[in-house]
Image (cartoon, rainbow, N blue to C red):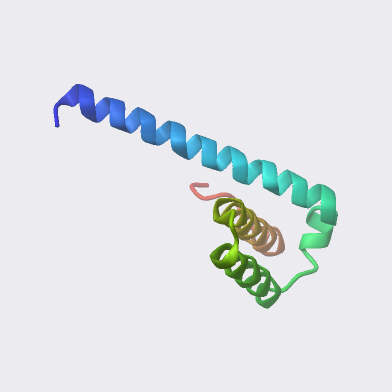
């Protein structure tokens, strides 16, 4: 693969990743509006998060819209990480 083709592939891949992340972040916003945001999220244990994620992932297997379910799984995982970080007083990676 020549240099220009590799560049085009990298750009297409980055665009696709940005679309997915945009969808996940939009779902996180919806979840926060639906459930109450950080105050609600921080009341959950790691076991709770695991159960929510597994339940949603199981839906993706039997769903006709597996992508939408997997976006919800990713948003739940992001919520869990954010909650764990707040509880630990953690700083973002790289600090």
Residue at image x 17%, y 25%? 3
Q: State the residue lying farthest toward the front.
A: 64
Residue at image x 76%, y 52%? 31
Closer-to-camera residue (93/23): 23
Quadrant housing residue 54: bottom right
Closer-to-camera residue (51/85): 51
Which quadrant of the figure contains the N terminus?
top left
Where is residue 43 shown, x and y percent of the image? 80, 68
Figure label count: 0
Quadrant housing residue 89: bottom right
Q: State the residue lying farthest toward the bottom.
A: 47
Q: State the residue lying farthest toward the left.
A: 2
Closer-to-camera residue (18/41): 18
Q: In this view, does 34 lie to the left or right of 1?
A: right
Where is residue 42 shown, x and y percent of the image? 77, 63
Q: In this view, does 19 lie to the left or right of 52?
A: left
Picture layout, residue 17 above or below residue 53: above
Residue at image x 70%, y 58%? 86
Q: In this view, does 81 lie to the left or right of 42?
A: left
Where is residue 58 shown, x and y percent of the image? 59, 70
Where is residue 75 shown, x and y percent of the image? 63, 53
């Amino acid at each position: 693969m020549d240099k220009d083709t590799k560049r085009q592939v990298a750009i297409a891949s980055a665009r696709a990743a940005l679309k997915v992340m945009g969808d996940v972040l939009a779902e996180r916003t919806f979840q926060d509006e639906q459930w109450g945001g950080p105050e609600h999220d921080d009341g959950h244990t790691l076991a709770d998060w695991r159960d929510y994620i597994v339940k949603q992932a199981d839906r993706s297997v039997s769903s006709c819209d597996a992508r939408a379910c997997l976006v919800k799984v990713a948003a739940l995982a992001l919520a869990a990480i954010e909650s764990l970080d707040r509880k630990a007083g953690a700083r973002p990676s790289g600090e």
